[in-house]
Amino acid sequence: MRGDVKAIVMAGGSRCSWHAVLPPSLYPIIHRPLIWHILRWLAEGGVAEATICAGREMHLLMECLDDGSDAGVRLDYYQNELPRGSAGCVRDAASESGAKRFVVVEESCIPQFELNGLLEGHGRAEALLTFVLSRDGDSVGRGFISSGIYVLEREAFDEVPEAGCCGIEESLIPGLQACGARVEADMRERPCLTVGNAQSYLFANAHLLECGWHLNLPEVEYARHLQSRVHRTATCPLGTRLLGPVLIGPATFLADGVTVAGPAVIGANCHLGRGAVVSRSVLWDECTIGPNATVDMCVFTGETGVEPFEKVEHRVQVTPRPRNFVAPDASRARSTVFQTSGIRS
C-alpha cells in the first residue's frame, strides 16, 4: 500500500440530460456505480485512502459508498459549500490530510491503465504536477485530450488561493509553469472511458462487458451462461435467448421467448415480457419491457419501460426525481423521453 499517497475524487461536476435522476458518479455501470470503478482502480494501484469531494448530493454518495470497503479503500468525504473550482476543491479537501502526494480523478472518467506506472513516472520526473492525456477516439486526427486524472505534490497547492474559484487546467497548471515548477504530461494511447452522454455511457458498459468485467462481480451470486452472467435470483426460462455479452441483475424476470442481444445490461427487478427483444442497451432497476416490444441502443433509467409491441431505438428514457430524494422509490413521476441520434456502441 502507498501510505504517502491519497486519492481525491471530484464528484458533482458533470451534467447530462438525465442528471436529475442520479448524480453522474452513481450511474450504474455493470451493476456498480461509476465511481466504484474509479475507487477500485485506485485500490488496485495501492492507494488505501480516498476523499470524495462533492456538493449538495453528498448524502447520496455517502449512502451508496459508505466507508468504501466494498471497493477496497477507506473513504472520507468533503462537501463543497461554495464554488471553488477543481483546484480549489482539491486544495480544501487535501488540507484535512497529512499525505504528501495526491491522485485526483474526475467522476466521469474510468481509467484504463495501471496507476503504478503513472505514479512512477511522476516520481522519476520529480514533477510538482502530472496530468494525463489520452488518445481521443472520436477525433478525426485522433489527438490527445485531457482525461481528468492528475498527480499533485502537496506543494502545488501553494499556488491555489484560499478563497475564490481556481481550476486545475485553467489556473493551477499555467500558474505552476509561470513560476518555473515542473509540470509533466503523461501520454496514454489507450483512451479512458469517459461518461458524458448516452453514447459514451453505452460504450463504457459495452467495453467493460467485453473486457474482463466479470472480475468485479461476486462469482457466488452470478451464474455463467457462455458469454453472459445471470444473477442467481433472476428468472430465465429455457426459451430465453442470451446472445453475446449480457448481464442480468437480481430478481429480474425474463418471460419465455425473450431475446437479449449483447452488449446489454439489465438491472435488478426488471420484467421483460414474452417475445420482447432488447439489444445493445442498458436498463436500470425496475424497468418493464412489454410483450413483443423491441428496444435497441437505449438507456432506460429506473422504473421506466415500453408498451407491448412498441419499437424504440436510440432513446434515453428518464424518470425525473426530486433532487433531494433519499430512497430509490421516493418518487414515481411520469417518465420523460429524450430522443438521441446516432448512438453507436
Image (spheres, helix red, strand yellow):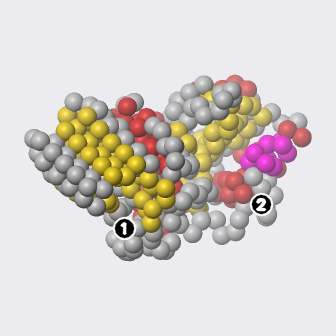
Vertical relation: 255 (above or below) 123: below
| Residue ID for mark 1 | 328
Name the residue rendered at 63%, 50% in the picture: 98
Q: Nearer the viewer, residue 231 or 37?
A: 231
Q: Quadrant of residue 52?
A: bottom right
Please state, as top left, top right, bottom left or bottom right, where the C terminus lies in the image: top left
Magenta stretch: includes residue 174: yes
- The amino acid marked with disc number 2 is Cys
Q: Secondary structure at mark 1?
A: loop
Asked whether, in this view, residue 177 is left or right of residue 192, the answer is right
Q: Secondary structure at mark 2?
A: loop
Q: Residue 3 placed where, x, y %?
A: 55, 41
Vertical relation: 270 (above or below) 213: below
- First along the sequence among labels 1 and 2: 2
Name the residue rendered at 57%, 69% in the picture: 56
Q: Which mark is on residue 165? A: 2
- For the record, the magenta segment spans 168-176
